[in-house]
Amino acid sequence: MLTGEEYDELIMSLVEETLQAPQPDRDKRLRALCRDASVYEEVCRRIEWEQRMGRFLLDPLIERPSLPDPLMPGNQDSSKYMSKRCACMADRA
């Protein structure tokens, strides 16, 4: 018997492997991989949700402008942060 974590890992590995197969071959491939009907049903349900979600949360809704790194050398604030870091490191010594 699999624990909850092991079961989830099994399901997700089957989902990933099945999604890599071409669309027409997925069901046949999944049936060959799953001998347990409950595992087969769970994988089918998760694959359906993966397809419904598409690229949701993979592509940003709003593009954020790139901002300069405030800790890069030469920025006014970088020396302030570095001095605090050095002071903290000196306290530990």
Image: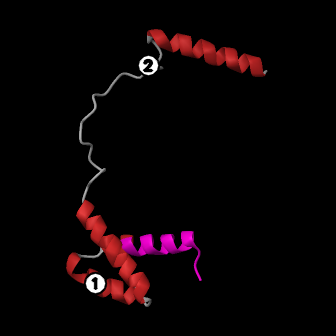
Residue of label 1: 27
Name the residue rendered at 63%, 19% in the picture: 85
Q: Give the residues drawn in magenta, as a range.
A: 1-15
Q: Is residue 34 magenta?
A: no
Element under disc 1: helix
Q: So how many labels did they put on this image?
A: 2
Task: Using residue 27 as the reference point, say whether residue 73 is left or right of it.
Answer: right
Gap between marks 2 and 1 measured at Cα: 51 Å
Place of residue 79 in the rendered image (x, y in percent of width and height, measured from the top left):
53, 11
Left or right: residue 55 compared with residue 8: left
Residue with the most extreme left position? 24
Where residue 72 is drawn, which disc sits there?
none
The numbered mark, 2 or 1, whose residue comes first in the sequence reads 1
- Residue designated by label 2: 70
Most common SS among magenta residues: helix
Picture layout, residue 88 above or below residue 45:
above
